[in-house]
Amino acid sequence: MRLLEKVIPAFWDQQEVASKFKRLYNFRRIWKVTVILTSVVSILPLLFFALIDYNVTKESVESEIILRTSQFTSNVWRSVSFFLDERRAALEFAIYDNTFEELCNPVRLAELLENLKKGFGGFADIGVINSAGFQKNYIGPYTLELEGKDYSDQEWFGEVVEQGKYISDMFLGFRNVEHMVIAVKHDLPDGSFYVLRATLEQQFSNMLTQMEVSGRGDTFLINKNGMIQTPSRYYGKVFEKISLPVPRYSPKSQVIEGKNSDGTSIIVGYAYIPESPFILMVVKQKNELMKPWYETRIYLIGYLVISITVIIIWILGSATYLVSRLHSADQKRVKNLHMAEYSNKMASIGRLAAGVAHEVNNPLAIINEKAGLIKDIFTYRNEHTGDAKLISTVDAILSSVERCGKITRRLLRFARHMDVNIQQISLEEIINEVLGFLGKEAEYRDIDIIVDIDKEIPRLESDRGKLQQIFLNIINNAYAAMSDGGRLEISVRCKEEGFVSATVFDNGCGIPEPDLKRVFEPFFSTKTNRGGTGLGLSITYGLVHELGGEIHATSKAGEGTSFIITLPLKMTPKKEDKTCEYY
Amino acid sequence: MRVLLVDDEEEFVTTLAERMSFREIDADWATSAEDALKLVETSTYDIALLDVKMPRISGLELKKRLVEKCPGMKFIFLTGHGSEDDFVAGTTEAGAAFYLVKPVNIETLVRKMNEVLNS
C-alpha cells in the first residue's frame, strides 16, 4: 500500500475546495481519457497486424500440412492399388494361360503356386472352383478341409460370378492369421466358367506398417464398414471397429480435418481403393504437425506482450508526467490568484484600518485635550484640587483615551507594514504585537499563553509585515485547533549560527499522521465544509520561504501540534518559484 | 518658546493652546494653512505643530511655505491619519521621532518640542 501511495500522483486525490477560483480541469478524467485514447490508437494497430500475421501464418502452415498429407495419401493409395492390381493380374494371367483341365491337375497347380510365390511372394494357397461352386483342385496347407468344398452359396462366389473378379476383406479363417482372398473368373466359349481363388498373407500389413509418417502418423486400411484391416498404431486392433467415422466416398484421395475421441485435432487423408473393399486411412496428429508453428506463435505472442507492456508503461508514465505538470501549473495558477486576493485583502484591510484610525483619532484627540484641559484647570488654577473624585474621573477618561490611542496606533502600524520593508526587528516585539491583537480572544476563551523568549536573541534583519502575517496565521491556526481552556506556548531560541527558531505549540486536537505531510500543500484543508480554503498554512509556508526560512510541523493526534519556524538573522530572499516546491 | 498650532479641528487647537498656556508656552493657533501664513507675517515662532491632513493645503505643503518665510522654524507633525504614504512623507520631512499620531499625551508633546528645539 505504501508503494501504491508513492506511485499515485498528487492530482489523483485532489480535493475540490469551496473557492471562487475553480479549477479548469478534472485531472483524473484528463488522465483517463489520455491513457485510454493513446492506448487504443497505439495498441489497436499492433493487435490488428499481429492478428493478421497470426492468421496468415497459421493458414499457410495448415494448407502446407494438408498439401503434404494429400500427396502422401495419394502416393500410398497408388502403391496399394498397384499391389492389388499386380496380384490380380498375376492370377488373371494364370487363369488365361492354363485350361481348366490343366488347372485341375494338382501338379500343374502346385507348380503355378510355387511360381507365384517366387514371383510375387505372399501367396499361401490356390484353388480352382468350377461353375457349380465346387472346389475342384486345391494346393495349400488345408487340403483336407478345403478339397471339394462347395462355395456356391457363399457371397464372394456370387460376386466373382457377377463381376469377374473379387477381392475379400481381411479375415482370420482356419489359419488364424490375417489374410485375404483374390478370385478371378475365366468365361469359356460354351458359357460355362471357372474360378481361380488364391490367398494372400501378411504382405499388405508389412507394407503399410513400415511406412514412416510424420506427425505421429498412422497409415492403415479399413473396410467400408469401418473395420480395421491392417494394424494401426493408435486406432484399434485389426478387425475392431475404428473410433473415427468412415469417410464419405470419393473417387480421389481426400484430406479432411477431424477430432479424436479425446478431442485432439487430427488430419485425415483417405482414399477408396478401386475394385476392392478397402479404404486407405492416413491419420496425422495436427498438434504434432503444428509444433514448429506453435513455437513461432509463442515468439509472436511474447513479442506482442512485451511491446504492449512497454507501450502501456510509456503511456502511463508520459500521461502521468504531463497531467502532473498540468496539475502543478494549475495549482500554481490558483494559488497565485489566491495570493493576489490575499494581498489585496490585506491591502484593503490596511486602507480601512488607516481610514478608521484617522476618523477615530481626531475626535479622540479632542476628547484627550478637553479632558486634559479640565485636569489642567484643576491642577494649575488650584480650583477643586481637593475633589479627588473629579480628578480620578478625568484620569479615567485620559487613560481610556490612551487605550483607544494604542489600539488605533497598533492598527496603523499593522496596516503600514503590508509592503516589503526590510528592517531590524525584534522578534519579541512582533510576537507581542500579534498577541496584542489576539490577546483578548485568548482571555475570553481562557487560553493560557506562555511566551518564553531568549533575551539574548539578536535583532533580525527581516520583513516586519511578513513576520506579522506568519505569526498571525500560525497563532490563529493554533486557536482554531484548541478548545476553550487550552494552552499556547511560544518559545524563541537561537538555533545554529545565524538562525533563530520559533516554536508555537498548542495542546489542541493535533493533526493525524497522514495529514501532517500535507498541511502546507495548497488547498489541503480539513475545514472545507466550514469555509476553509486550505491556503492559510500554504501562504504561511510561502511567506517563510520568502524570508529565507523553513517551517515544519510535528503533531500527535489528541496531544497537540508544534509549528517550528526557523528564520535567518539576515534575510536572503529565495527565488519565488522555490516556494512552490511543495507540490 | 513661541508655538504655532495649525489644525483644521478648531476644538482641538484651541484646547491645546489653552493647555500650553498653563505650561507657560506661548501658543497661537490657526485652523487653516492660509490663517497660519497670515500669522507668521506678524509674529515669529520657534516651532510649528502641523496637522498633516488639512483641507486645500496639507501640512506638508504648509511646512515648505513656512520654511521659505521663516528659515529657522522647527516642525512637529501631528496626524490622526496613518497611511503608508503620509508616514513616509512625514518622517522624511520631520524625522520618525517628530511624526506623532493623535491622540498625544501633552507631556510627551512638550518633551518632543523641547527635543526638536535643542536639536
Image (spheres, coloured by chain):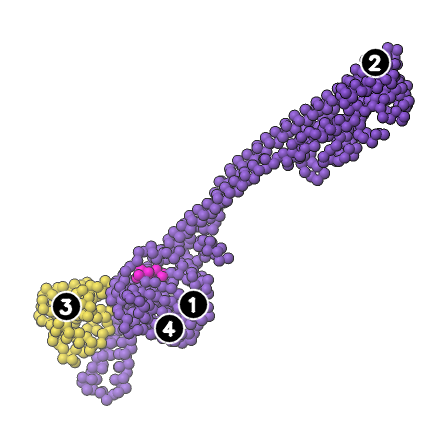
Residue A530, by quadrant, is bottom left
Position of A13 with respect to A573 (left or right) is right
Q: Nearer the viewer, mark 3 or mark 1?
A: 1
Q: Mark 4 belongs to which subunit? A: A
The answer for how far apart the CA atoms under marks 3 and 2 are is 172 Å
Q: Mark 2 belongs to which subunit? A: A
Q: Nearer the viewer, mark 4 or mark 1?
A: 1
Q: Are marks 4 and 1 in contact (CB under 8 Å)?
A: no
The answer for how far apart the CA atoms under marks 4 and 2 are is 137 Å
The amino acid type, in three-letter code, at marker 2 is Asn
The answer for how far apart the CA atoms under marks 4 and 3 are is 56 Å
The amino acid type, in three-letter code, at marker 1 is Ser
Above or below residue A60? Residue A526 is below
Q: Mark 3 belongs to which subunit? A: B
Report whether residue A207 is seen.
Answer: yes
Q: Which chain is purple?
A: A
Q: Mark 1 belongs to which subunit? A: A
As helix, strand or loop, the secondary structure at mark 2 comes to loop
Q: Mark 4 or 1 closer to N-term?
A: 4
The amino acid type, in three-letter code, at marker 4 is Glu
- Report the front residue among A113 and A492: A113
Q: Are marks 2 and 1 in contact (CB under 8 Å)?
A: no
Q: Which chain is yellow?
A: B
Find the magenta span and give its range.
A539-548
Identify the residue under disc 2. Answer: A98
Which numbered tag is attached to residue A555? 1
* Disc 4 with disc 1 on a shared chain: yes
Query: Which residue appears at 37% of the width and 53% of the height?
Result: A333
Identify the residue under disc 4. Answer: A489
Residue A544 included in the magenta stretch of the image? yes
